[in-house]
Amino acid sequence: MIRIRFVLLLVLMAMAASCSRSSINERELFANADTITVDLDNIRPISLNAVFDKISFLRLETNKNCMIAVIDDVLFMENSIAVVDKNMSKAVFLFDYNGKFVNRLSYLGNGPREYLNINHVFKVTNSIIAIQDRMKDVVLYFDDKGTFLYQTEGLQYGCDIECIGCNRIAVDVRSVGGIYNPRTEDYAFVVSDSLYQKVYAVGTDTYSEKLNYGATKRLFRYNDIVYGIPNFENYVYQFDSEGVCVKYVLDIISDDVSDFRYSTREELKQLEQRYPFFKGHFYEFDNYSCFVIKSASFNAYILYNHQTKDVYLLDSEYANPLITFFWNPYMVDAGNAFVTSSLPATLLSYKEQFYDGTSVEIRKDLDLLYNDMKVDDNPVLFFYHLKDTISE
């Protein structure tokens, strides 16, 4: 197998310095953006009963070859579900859509076809998945049944990676410029072609020596579209095979963190304690988008209806007790549903409470959930399916 040597992303970042932001027309960038007005003092609440069609779950098979400690990410492939455990098992587990174990991607080591650390797992296509290891400067590629395909080199830097169609790659490079390659302009995302030559760079990287803000996941896909959210910009960028645009602009009706100047981590923390802000928690679906606006007192889940342009605040009213696990969903890449997980130990601690006072129909679901459940079983995936239309 021929090993392909990619151009180091460090070089790609140096090239970004020579590209003026004016190469991307700002008017065109924002031309088709949806502006979403969020007034936290006067927003319409909507119950989860009106939003969710149903709640379902998937118990993942447990055996000696697939012991999962913590689920860091979930990717939906053509023939399997990829469950990522970066730090404990340091492996990617493949299950079919009935929860049956298929294969384990676990190649720890310093030799060929091996990794020392899992920094990021991403989809190349619906049937190819990749594991990035920045320590060894390699990316390993597998099919959705777990068969090793090939490996590449040169993606040592960058936080997240997502493939855009067949000939583009988006890389989250926040803080790379500040640490490895000081330059006059710092970008959040760089998009390259299939030969890793830079096509364009967008977004602002707020990193500095005094403002070393911990990066969370900011690049992700929903179906064939990739979205990017820089630090403390109220924008959501959309990347596809045609280029880049700003898809959503959040207009928060009150002072928010993005309205102020700050140059140190301490200044930013003080602002976070006083003002709301969009910290990049965003979920895209077929008919809706969801934004999490954080404030000192609560996290507001803002639901935006693509068709009607209505904006709602999700509240916790729902008859099914499994709503307990809704509030920390993964950023999933397919399906019209929020996805979360819970450990059996947690589920078993709620068992008596869940059964108490529930309907016969919900009890049937609980019977399936708890059937022969053991405390050391693998985590359970929960799916909160959105309705096609909302009736208030």
Image (spheres, rainbow, N blue to C red):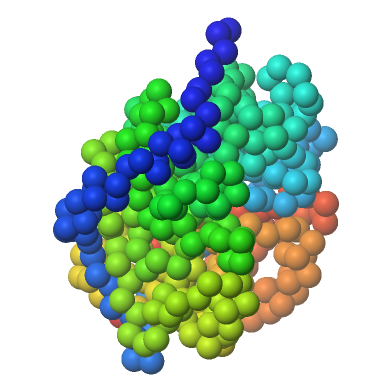
Towards the viewer: 145 or 390: 145
Q: Left of 14 or right of it: where is 380? A: right
Towards the viewer: 292 or 256: 256
Residue 354 occupies quadrant: bottom right
Q: Is residue 118 visible?
A: yes
**Percent coordinates x, y for residue 100 in the rendering:** 65, 36
Residue 353 occupies quadrant: bottom right
Residue plotted at (73% across, 64% down): 347
The N terminus lies in quadrant: top right
Q: Is residue 298 visible?
A: no
The C terminus lies in quadrant: bottom left
**Percent coordinates x, y for residue 210 in the rendering:** 61, 66
Q: Left of 340 or right of it: where is 352? A: right
Residue with the most extreme top position: 1
In the displayed structure, would residue 146 be above or below residue 209?
A: above
Residue plotted at (44% across, 62% down): 282
Q: Left of 283 or right of it: where is 92? A: right
**Percent coordinates x, y for residue 179 in the rendering:** 60, 49
Residue plotted at (58% across, 66% down): 211
Residue 29 occupies quadrant: bottom left
**Percent coordinates x, y for residue 76 in the rendering:** 50, 41
Residue with the most extreme bottom position: 41
In the displayed structure, would residue 231 be above or below residue 61?
A: below
Towards the viewer: 4 or 67: 4
Residue plotted at (25% across, 75% down): 310
Q: Left of 190 or right of it: where is 376? A: right
In the displayed structure, would residue 354 be above or below residue 154?
A: below
Q: How many marks?
A: 0
